[in-house]
Amino acid sequence: MSKIKAIHGREVLDSRGFPTVEVEVSVADPRSSSEVCTGRAIVPSGASTGEGEALELRDGDPKRYLGKGVLTAVQNVNERIAPSMIGREFQLQSLLDDALRDLDGTPNKSTLGANAILGVSMAFLRAQALAQRTPSDQFIAQHYGSPGVTLPVPLMNIINGGKHADNGLAVQEFMIVPAGFDRFSEALRAGAEIFHRLKKILHKQGLSTGVGDEGGFAPQFSGAKSHEQALVAITQAVSDAGYKLGEQIFLALDSAASEFSDGKSGYLFEGQTLTSEEMIGVYSQWAKDFPIISIEDGLSEHDWKGWDLLTRTLGDKCQLVGDDLFCTNPIQLKRGIDSKIANAILIKLNQIGTVTETLETMKLAASAGYHAIMSHRSGETEDTFIADLAVGTDCGQIKTGSASRTDRIAKYNQLLRLEERLGDRARFAGLKFYEKFKK
Ligand code: PGA
Ligand code: ZN
């Protein structure tokens, strides 16, 4: 690996128009002593964050960006991380990440900010990949010890609710899962066509076709059973688009249930307060009525007793994904594995704050037979690092929004490029991940 020559951070904007950290890391070019290779990365930002996430450092100055400026994090990159890392040569990504963690000195990265640290970690990886004339996805594959040939199944969030919209739906994400295809590009095409069909259906029903934070529609369904209405509209869109539900297209939910938990053991759902058992009853019924193969954060991150019952009730029928529950944190995941809670984990780099710890969590998940789903945040940018990471680790699934908004599409487009570059070597993860859940 090459010596670090420069590190520079700056404040840029994310897809919600709030500031985030961009970092450039330059390393010596092994082919020319006078040249450098510069990698650049932008850190995303969540809205429905788990309590165990690494700290996203915000300035808190109400006069700038409503307190959401990141000048302190940028300053930490330029005045604290850069002087301590420039001139050093790290033989492995993990050594750089260890040095960053040592410099910070806290478990949740609250001294420098996870947004400062992650920007450097990702940009360093890209710079090293450039120095070795290796595409980032293949560089990650070598590093992770994976073939780096698997295009992930996209979990496309075509109806947004919860904290990502303002439409009264408790469940945050209604996703279509185009798994029954031979190629990623065909799956993506199906997803986009269904998205367009759904627009027509909502329009006919007199509902809004404006989109939420992740590019899915955010209609205001009226009536007591608003969630079922959303599921029915999606199934209609699948058939209007000419695809087979339950064979080619499956459904997935991200409840982000911590957000509608009442802080005790109740869930504020469709005008009622439900117990964990009653929420599980709702999911069980939906899983009977619709081909739902994945439910993320079905219960609150604090409701481990409920999670135990959820896993015992639906764990052999559905992928049960821990997002806020695990926060991409190996310690939290280990606790889940030991307690047999959930059977999959959502992977978000900025929940933990370095590339190395993210990979460590993924390795742990794989060793326990848990699926790992690469994920964007609701506040995204043009950065496509997660597309490279999904292919480089062969994790098989990616959640990166709907078929609209360039912050989401940028990842899909990168995956199309990777599929093309891999050519005959490309594999589409397809139905493999869901076979054991099919009824
Ligand atoms: P967030 O939402 O990025 O706002 O946390 C995404 C998710 O919950 O999966
Ligand atoms: Zn989630």
Image: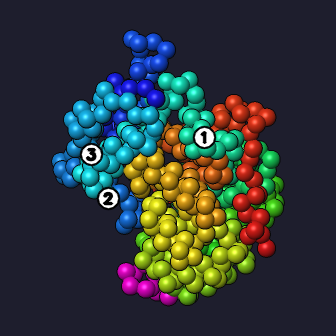
Q: Which residue is mark 2?
A: 107
- Classify mark 3: residues with Cα within 10 Å, few (<14), some (14-19) or many (20+): some
* For residue 378, side relative to residue 103 (left or right): right
State which quadrant residue 399 falls in.
Answer: bottom right
Query: Dividing the image into 4 quarters, which one contains the C terminus?
Result: bottom right
| Amino acid type, mark 2 | Pro
Query: Percent from the top left, x then y, of residue 307?
Result: 53, 79
Let me know if residue 269 is in the magenta part: yes
Give the mark, 3 or 1, whose residue is nearer the N terminus.
Answer: 3
- Classify mark 1: residues with Cα within 10 Å, few (<14), some (14-19) or many (20+): many
Judged from the image, the secondary structure of the residue bearing numbered disc 3 is helix
What residue is rendered at 56% in x and 23% in y? 133
Q: Nearer the viewer, residue 239 or 321?
A: 321
| Amino acid type, mark 1 | Ala
Q: Which stretch appears magenta?
A: 261-275
What residue is rendered at 66% in x and 35% in y? 418
Q: Which is the main secondary structure of the residues drawn in magenta?
A: loop
1 and 2 marks in contact (CB < 8 Å): no
Q: Which residue is mark 1?
A: 141
State which quadrant residue 301 falls in.
Answer: bottom left
Q: Which mark is residue 103?
A: 3
